[in-house]
Image (cartoon, rainbow, N blue to C red):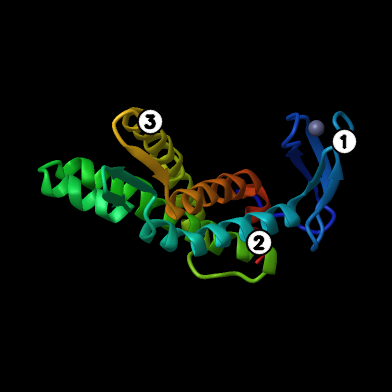
């Protein structure tokens, strides 16, 4: 890790085409226009988007888990399923490791990941140093490959395809909320700029 001072040349890469660029570092971050593809690179606003998307996902996470994502009607009998009910059903059928894997990868790890991205992005946006932010920024990189809300969504779609010939299957509110969580999570990941965070962190 290197310490940057005002006016020092810093290297960065265009997120759109990968071209390596150089710019001057100042207290307000930096803004560059890529000469190859005209993509606008702004270290600070990128982290602002990351903060907004990750907070949106955190807010939607709990209702997404509590509302049913599927409704299945067989004759006059209607079954609903939420994520927590699915985990409880797997545990009661004896598939405890599978239940734990779903709980961790579809709920706990994504929620923790989103909290940490919000926390670290807030430091880069506000310019205020927060406790343990450096260690937590490292931890984000360990967590990011273990959140699998998108895999869970695909699993729901596969189960719908398999059940559609046997019963009437409807998507519940939870499915749309979960899709929104997935979209915001991916967006926060795309805009999360660890270089912008470390530049801000090193100035303190
Ligand atoms: Zn470019």
How many C-alpha atoms fall within 10 Å of the one at disc 1: few (<14), some, or many (≥20)? few
Q: Disc number at residue 158?
A: 3
* Res 125 visible: yes
| Residue 22 at x, y percent in the picture | 82, 40
Q: Residue furthest front?
A: 76
- Whether ligand 1 has any atom under 8 Å from the Cβ at mark 1 is answered as yes
Which circle's residue, 2 or 3, is located before the other in the chain? 2
Q: Quadrant of residue 41?
A: top right
Instruction: Name the residue rendered at 68%, 52% in the picture.
Output: 196
| Residue 71 at x, y percent in the picture | 35, 48
**How much space separates mark 2 and mark 3, taking CA atoms?**
40 Å
| Residue 103 at x, y percent in the picture | 29, 50
Q: Quadrant of the C terminus?
A: bottom right
Task: Report the front residue among 180 and 43.
Answer: 180
In front: mark 2 or mark 3? Answer: 3
| Residue 39 at x, y percent in the picture | 82, 38
Instruction: Name the residue rendered at 46%, 44% in the picture.
Output: 144
Q: Which residue is mark 2?
A: 124
Secondary element under disc 1, as helix, strand or loop, is loop
The answer to whether residue 52 is above or below residue 46 is below
Which circle's residue, 3 or 1, is located before the other in the chain? 1
Q: Are marks 2 and 1 in contact (CB under 8 Å)?
A: no
Q: Which residue is mark 1?
A: 38
- Whether ligand 1 has any atom under 8 Å from the Cβ at mark 3 is answered as no
**How much space separates mark 3 and mark 1, taking CA atoms?**
40 Å
Task: Report the front residue among 90 and 131.
Answer: 90
């Amino acid at each position: 890790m290197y310490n940057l001072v005002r006016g020092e040349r810093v290297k960065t890469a265009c997120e759109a085409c990968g071209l390596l660029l150089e710019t001057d570092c100042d207290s307000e971050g930096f803004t560059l226009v890529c000469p190859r593809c005209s993509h606008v690179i702004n270290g600070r606003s990128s982290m602002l988007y990351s903060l907004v998307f990750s907070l949106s996902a955190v807010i939607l996470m709990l209702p997404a888990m509590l509302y049913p994502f599927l409704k299945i009607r067989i004759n006059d009998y209607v079954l609903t399923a939420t994520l927590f009910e699915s985990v409880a059903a797997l545990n009661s059928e004896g598939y405890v490791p599978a239940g734990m894997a779903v709980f961790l990868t579809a709920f706990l790890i994504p929620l923790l990941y989103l909290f940490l991205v919000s926390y670290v992005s807030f430091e880069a946006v506000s310019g205020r140093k927060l406790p343990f932010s450096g260690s937590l920024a490292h931890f984000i990189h360990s967590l990011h490959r273990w959140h699998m809300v998108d895999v869970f969504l695909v699993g729901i779609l596969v189960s719908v395809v398999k059940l559609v010939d046997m019963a009437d299957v409807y998507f519940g509110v939870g499915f749309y909320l979960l899709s929104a969580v997935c979209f915001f999570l991916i967006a926060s990941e795309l805009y999360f700029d660890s270089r912008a965070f470390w530049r801000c962190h090193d100035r303190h």
